[in-house]
Image: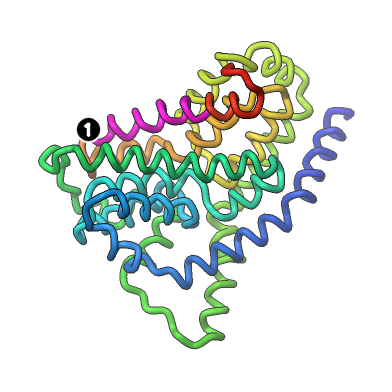
């Protein structure tokens, strides 16, 4: 009974801390969704040089699309002439974080985590994009028709296709405000509300479950913390918004800053469905480069953050 009371108290505290930030994040996502159509995004990414890669990375950081939803947009960008570099940069940065995730991260974990992850994701996108641009286009397999509409039944794909498929929004202000509110208060909660709630539940359990606290403090505060964060991030999928409460629980349970940052970077980007889809759409060599950049850069950036925050590497 004491455990349940502690869990409910912690869960209630998280809800009170998060509800307003989540609402603001959802509303901001609705504005981005309504007023920044993907055909404008695609238009400027076929040029040479680093600027299209930077643009794709910056757009991906704030765009409210999960890892599955980013794939149909990326394929459309590629078919419309975008170079491989910007496409891969977009695939890395888009699911890694978003406006709601950044707002919640600021609320729970403070400005240092939020600003660092914002720039860290852009750096990962730039590295991935530069590697993509030097890879021969002949090594990239032609996307097959079955991926034109996004993988499977993932709800985010439906949203992405709606925007990329040429749907014209009315210029009537009332209609556009209605569209913003519908996306913010109905569509997004349906898509990631359950994952966000699950993230809060798991975070609350970690906070009150003594064996988990002991395990983290004793064994995951050093180099093994990086291994744990990388493996868990690769093996499980939690959206960038739902990822933040779990990372906060890891940090408050004794995990070092670096592994927590690794978990924040890796967790939202990778999923089994996304890995299979990238291989099918772009080929094995691109998939290998994609995973290599995610793993290596997340560890490097995690160590850098740990060094910045605690003056130690591990």
Name the spot of residue 210 as percent of width and height, x first.
78, 20
Magenta-colored segment: predominant secondary structure: helix
Q: Which residues are magenta?
A: 286-302
Q: Is residue 290 magenta?
A: yes
Q: Is residue 47 magenta?
A: no
- Where, quadrant-wise, is the C terminus in this rendering? top right
Q: Is residue 68 above or below residue 227?
A: below
Residue shown at the point (59%, 49%) measured from the top left: 101
Name the spot of residue 244 as percent of width and height, x first.
62, 41
Residue shown at the point (57%, 18%) measured from the top left: 313
Residue shown at the point (61%, 53%) measured from the top left: 193
**Quadrant in which residue 4 is drawn:** top right
Which residue occupies the foreground of this view, 306 or 179?
A: 306
- 159 sits left or right of 112 in the view: left
Q: How is the image coloured?
A: rainbow
**Which residue is the site of mark 1?**
284
Name the spot of residue 197 as percent of width and height, x first.
66, 46
- Helix, strand or loop at label 1? It is helix
User: Would you call the spot at circle 1 few (<14 residues within 10 Å), some (14-19), or many (20 or more)?
Assistant: some
Which residue occupies the foreground of this view, 136 or 220?
A: 136
């Amino acid at each position: 009974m004491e455990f349940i009371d502690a869990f409910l108290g912690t869960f209630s505290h998280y809800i009170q801390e998060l509800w307003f930030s989540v609402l603001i994040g959802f509303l901001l996502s609705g504005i981005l969704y309504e007023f920044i159509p993907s055909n404008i995004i695609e238009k400027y990414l076929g040029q040479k040089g680093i600027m299209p890669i930077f643009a794709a990375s910056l757009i991906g950081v704030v765009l409210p699309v999960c890892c599955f939803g980013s794939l149909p947009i990326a394929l459309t960008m590629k078919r419309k002439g975008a170079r491989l570099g910007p496409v891969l940069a977009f695939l890395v940065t888009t699911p890694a974080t978003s406006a709601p995730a950044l707002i919640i991260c600021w609320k729970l974990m403070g400005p240092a985590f939020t600003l660092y992850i914002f720039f860290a994701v852009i750096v990962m996108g730039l590295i991935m994009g530069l590697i993509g641009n030097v890879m021969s286009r002949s090594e990239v397999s032609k996307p097959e028709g079955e991926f034109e509409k996004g993988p499977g039944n993932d709800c985010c794909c439906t949203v992405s296709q709606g925007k990329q498929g040429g749907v014209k929004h009315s210029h009537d202000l009332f209609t556009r405000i209605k569209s913003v509110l519908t996306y913010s208060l109905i569509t997004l909660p349906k898509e990631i509300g359950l994952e966000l709630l699950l993230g809060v539940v798991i975070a609350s359990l970690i906070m009150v479950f003594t064996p988990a606290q002991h395990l983290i403090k004793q064994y995951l505060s050093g180099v093994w913390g990086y291994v744990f964060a990388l493996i868990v991030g690769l093996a499980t999928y939690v959206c960038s918004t739902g990822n933040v409460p779990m990372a906060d629980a890891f940090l408050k349970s004794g995990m070092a800053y670096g592994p927590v940052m690794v978990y924040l970077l890796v967790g939202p980007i990778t999923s089994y469905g996304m890995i299979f889809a990238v291989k099918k759409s772009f080929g094995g060599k691109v998939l290998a480069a994609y995973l290599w950049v995610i793993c290596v850069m997340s560890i490097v950036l995690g160590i850098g953050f740990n060094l910045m925050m605690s003056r130690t590497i591990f």
